Image (cartoon, helix red, strand yellow):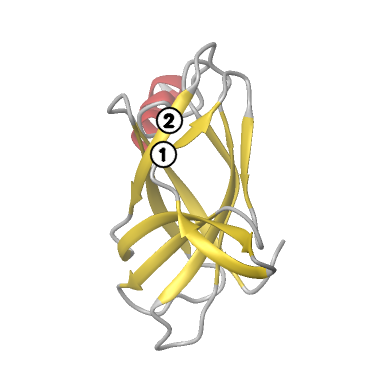
Amino acid sequence: MRRVAALALAGALCSTGCGRADGPVVEEAWVRAAPPGVAVQAGYLVLHNPARDAVTVVGARSDAFGRIDIHESVNRDGMRAMRRVERLDVPAGGRVRFEPGGRHLMLIGPARPYREGERLHIVLVFADGREYGFDAEVRGDAP
């Protein structure tokens, strides 16, 4: 009976694809804390695709923010700039890093100020219609 209850709880905590060999896996997810009044935060993670086929991320969402975009930092004429990424391919068996100074989730319009230690639920949306939900811890700086 305990095993059934544990399996039911694990199923309730996972979104589509959670920990399955044919779905994506998010590791090391965190959101940089921001002072009150700041309208944009950044989120970081490692997205692992253990499947035999590539997957394509086409968006993200969260009740904690009004909008989430995928951005990457690039050099343009010697200046650092950010550009929005509409589609992000993750190769079969590959990993894509979202990290400070590079690719990141641009978390726009927080519902309220978030404190260090809080966990925020974020959902990645894939081109094939699948979604993958994960929690990211709010931190003051890189882990």
Q: Nearer the viewer, residue 69 or 10?
A: 69
**Mark 2–mark 1 contact, CB under 8 Å?**
yes
How crowded pointer 2 is (Cα within 10 Å; few <14, some 14-19, many 20+) is rated as some
Q: SS at mark 2? A: strand
Is 126 placed above or below 119 here? Answer: above
- Locate the C terminus and report the quarter of the image it occupies: bottom right
Reading the chain from its start, which is encountered first: label 2 or label 1?
2
At a point 39% along the width and 53% down the height, the residue shown is: 121
* Picture quadrant of residue 100: bottom right
The amino acid marked with disc number 2 is Thr
* Residue sitting nearer the eye, 139 or 3: 139
Tag shown at residue 33: none
Q: Which residue is at a point 40% across and 80% down the rendered structure image?
A: 113
Point out residue 37 in the picture as x, y percentages from the top left corner: 39, 88
Image position, residue 127 (x, y; %): 33, 29
Q: Give residue 56's mark.
A: 2
Measured along the vertical axis of the image, is residue 98 above or below residue 108?
above
Going by the image, does 123 lie left or right of 82?
Answer: left
Side of 100 where 129 appears, left or right = left
Residue 108, by quadrant, is bottom left
Report the quarter where the N terminus lies: top left
Residue at horizontal 27%, vertical 28%? 129
Q: Please name the residue shown 39% across and 20% down the image.
A: 4
Which three-letter amino acid code belongs to the residue tagged 1? Arg
Residue 120 spot, x, y in % from top left: 43, 59
**Left or right of residue 89, residue 9 in this image:** left
Label 1 residue SS:
loop
- Give the answer, above or below, for where 44 lies relative to 6: below
**Dot 1 corresponds to which residue?**
87
